[in-house]
Amino acid sequence: MNEKKRILAISGSTRTRSANGFLIKAISEISQDIFTIEVYNSLAELPHFNPDLDNDNPPLQVTNFRNKLKKAEGILICTPEYAMGVPGSLKNAIDWTVSSCEFSKKPTALITASSSGLKGHASLLESLRIIEAQIADDAQLVISYVKIKISDQGIIIDDSTLTQVKKLISALNELLRSN
């Protein structure tokens, strides 16, 4: 039997009860036979990116975040779109990895789940590509009007969305197997 792959899930929302957190919960349930998902809940604790602090001894929160990324075999990002862009706390976290390269060649799945999500998704996808995250076309998804598609118990209640999420899980699993 193959060992389950370790996935680090990052919600781009810092809200305690966000739709993206519920989506991560749903994905954890759906994929429990193939992934072990650890949720990174400390996005709001990362200091503002400062190149002067990005050295051999960065802040402890940054070191902890980078270590979690290194230990994970794959990354799952579920994020809302804020003001047609990437939430600042998520972009800040990604900025802390530019020089240290934790995303480089790392199998990554990206879901933007928001009211619309298209512009924020495109922006974040470009950031992830420039830092060399490995994202297949099938490992990315925009879920518009997410609040009517997932319950606050972490259950996807829209059949089309459920099908798309299962396809994304398969694509991430394929990326992991090809690495």
Image (cartoon, grey):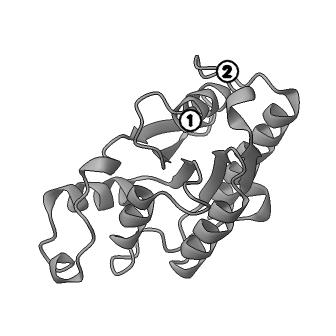
Residue found farthest to the left: 57
Q: Secondary structure at mark 1?
A: helix
Q: Residue 24: give its label.
A: 1
Query: Observer-nearest residue: 158 or 170?
Result: 158
| Secondary element type, mark 2 | loop
Q: Residues within 10 Å of mark 2 (few under 14, many from 20)?
A: some
Q: Amino acid at mark 1?
A: Ile
- The first of marks 2 and 1 along the sequence is 1
173 or 83: nearer the viewer: 83
Which residue is drawn at the image coordinates 47% and 68% (left, top)? Answer: 103
Task: Identify the disc placed on residue 151.
Answer: none
Q: Horizontal placement of 179 versus 47: left or right? A: right
The picture quadrant where one finds residue 135 is bottom right
Q: CA distance from mark 2 to mark 1?
A: 10 Å
| Residue pointed to by mark 2 | 155
Residue 148's place in the image compared with 130, above or below, is: above
Q: Quadrant of residue 35?
A: top right
Residue 58, given in percent of the width and then of the height, sits at 16, 70
Rendering coords of residue 115 (x, y %): 69, 44
Residue at image x 30%, y 48%?
Answer: 44
Can residue 150 be seen here? yes
Asked whether, in this view, residue 58 is left or right of residue 161, the answer is left
Of the pair 109 and 11, the residue shown nearer to us: 11
Residue 38 lies, with reference to residue 127, above or below; the image says: above
Q: Which residue is situated farthest in the top direction here?
A: 153
Circles 2 and 1: CB atoms closer than 8 Å: no
Q: Is residue 109 left or right of residue 160?
A: left
Amino acid at pointer 2:
Ile
Q: Residue at x 40, y 76 (%)?
A: 101
